[in-house]
Amino acid sequence: MAARFLESKTSQNASYANSIAIPISVINTPQLVAQQTLDLSAGTAGLTRVEFTGVMALQLPLVPVVTNITILVYRGLTTGGVLVFSASENLNVAILGPQLITIAGSDFNAPNIGNVPYTVFVTASLLGTTRVGPESFNFTAVSD
């Protein structure tokens, strides 16, 4: 059986490279990056999923040090929601310019209710790491 489309939305904070300069100001503390709400009420119980993809660019501080970046996706408005995805990567200290991080994941067995929020956060292990753009995250809900 083919999946049935329910809804798709985008949260786009920065369309272009180097179009923002948002410092990560607290070490290992989630910083809001993207948020979107989907109506999942037309889905089939136990067969509804939300697929998400995203890209963000970060830049190391002037004195590059090994820095770990973690992207977290929650079903909910805060980190008190259900963590449905996380990915960590060390930025390359040999690259002085922006570095792209991309993600792709799914929330299987998502609840069949209206207005389900999905929120993306980023953490960094080093002060001075800066979000520089682009930043774009897509959320698509389907059901079998």
Image: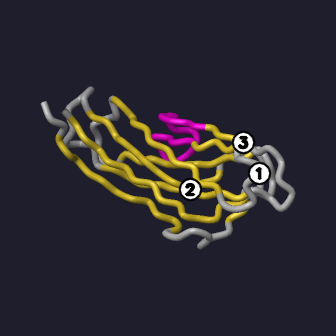
Q: Nearer the viewer, mark 1 or mark 2?
A: 1
Q: Badge 1: few (under 14), some or many (20 or more) residues near its Cα, within 10 Å?
A: few
Which label sits on residue 68? 3
67 with respect to 53 (left or right): right
User: What residue did someone put label 2 on?
Assistant: 56
Q: CA distance from mark 3 to mark 2?
A: 14 Å
Instruction: Residue 53: say if magenta.
Output: no
Residue that sits furthest to the front in the current view: 94
Residue 66 point in image, percent of width and height = 80, 44
User: What residue did someone put label 1 on?
Assistant: 94
Where does the C terminus fall, quadrant-wise? top left
First in sequence: mark 1 vs mark 2: 2
Main SS category, magenta section:
strand
Q: CA distance from mark 1 to mark 3?
A: 14 Å
Q: Secondary structure at mark 3?
A: strand
Residue that sits furthest to the top in the current view: 46
> Where are the magenta residues, as a range?
72-87
First in sequence: mark 1 vs mark 3: 3
What amino acid type is highlighted by mark number 3? Asn
Q: Secondary structure at mark 2?
A: strand
Q: Quadrant of residue 90?
A: top right
Q: Quadrant of residue 47?
A: top left
Residue 115 point in image, percent of width and height = 34, 49
